[in-house]
Image: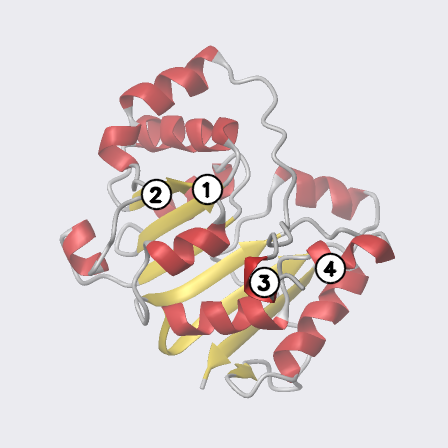
Amino acid sequence: MQDPQQRRQIKSFVLREGRITAGQKRALETLWPKFGIDNHAIVKDLDTLFGNSNPKVLEIGFGMGESLAQMAQDSPHTDFIGIEVHRPGVGSLLAEIEKRDLRNLKVMCGDAVELLASVLPDKSFDRIQIFFPDPWHKKRHNKRRLIQTDFLNKLAKKLKNNGILHLATDWEDYALHMKAALDSSPVYKNTTNNNGFAERPDYRPFTKFERRGYRLGHGVWDLIYEVV
């Protein structure tokens, strides 16, 4: 029988890059050396990486990066790292960094599970945020959902004491799934007074996708938990 440790890890994403625009390609070629963190790097200290002791935030799965760039622009005294597996999105964010002249945002390209394990140091982030991950809404695909107990445990190791994990989704079933996993964990505590879902904090911008969902009557659920 095959050793479970040797089985192929179930991926929470399908790598379909699509077409890379000329601007995204240029950004990947010219801006990555300045704002990118290599997948084979070993980052020992984020304060050294950014050259300051400002709060540190990690976003996993930033899509095309517009909302993450806006957060970095709105919070110049907070440092951000974004991870995205799709190169067009990485190229798009790199272009936004240059356009907005941001100095508090760096980018990684690859599987977040692998990068968390091999590149980023433990107890280094004040907040980790994952907004609108793929819901894999068909029941037979639920096993592909990124937010599972094992992954939550990995995230907790990367957060500082009393660090915050902020999740958001527009799929109620996934929201309930994430909440159940967090509530059953001994290392997370709900920050809302009624142990329910949180109000959207001001630091999370509305995305175009989210605004469209609201117009169509879709809900959005935020979960904000603290590492205890």
Kindly report the distance in space between the C-alpha atoms of the residues bearing marks 3 and 1: 20 Å
Report helix, strand or loop for mark 3: strand
Which residue shows up at 26% across the image and 55% down it?
Answer: 77
Report helix, strand or loop for mark 2: loop
Give the mark nearer the N terminus: 3 vs 1.
Answer: 1
Give the mark nearer the N terminus: 2 vs 1.
Answer: 2
Cβ atoms at labels 2 and 1 below 8 Å apart: yes
Cβ atoms at labels 2 and 4 below 8 Å apart: no
Q: What numbered label is drawn on residue 39?
A: 2
Q: Which residue is mark 1?
A: 110
Cβ atoms at labels 3 and 4 below 8 Å apart: no
Find residue 43 and report its horizontal and vertical position in percent: 24, 54
Kindly report the distance in space between the C-alpha atoms of the residues bearing marks 2 and 4: 26 Å
Q: Give the label, 3 or 4, closer to the camera.
A: 4
Within 10 Å of the Cα at label 2, are there few (<14), some (14-19), or many (20+) other Cα atoms? some
Q: Is residue 70 above or below residue 144?
A: above
Kindly report the distance in space between the C-alpha atoms of the residues bearing marks 2 and 1: 7 Å
Q: Give the label, 3 or 2, closer to the camera.
A: 2
Find residue 93 and report its horizontal and vertical position in percent: 42, 33
Residue type beneath disc 2: Asn
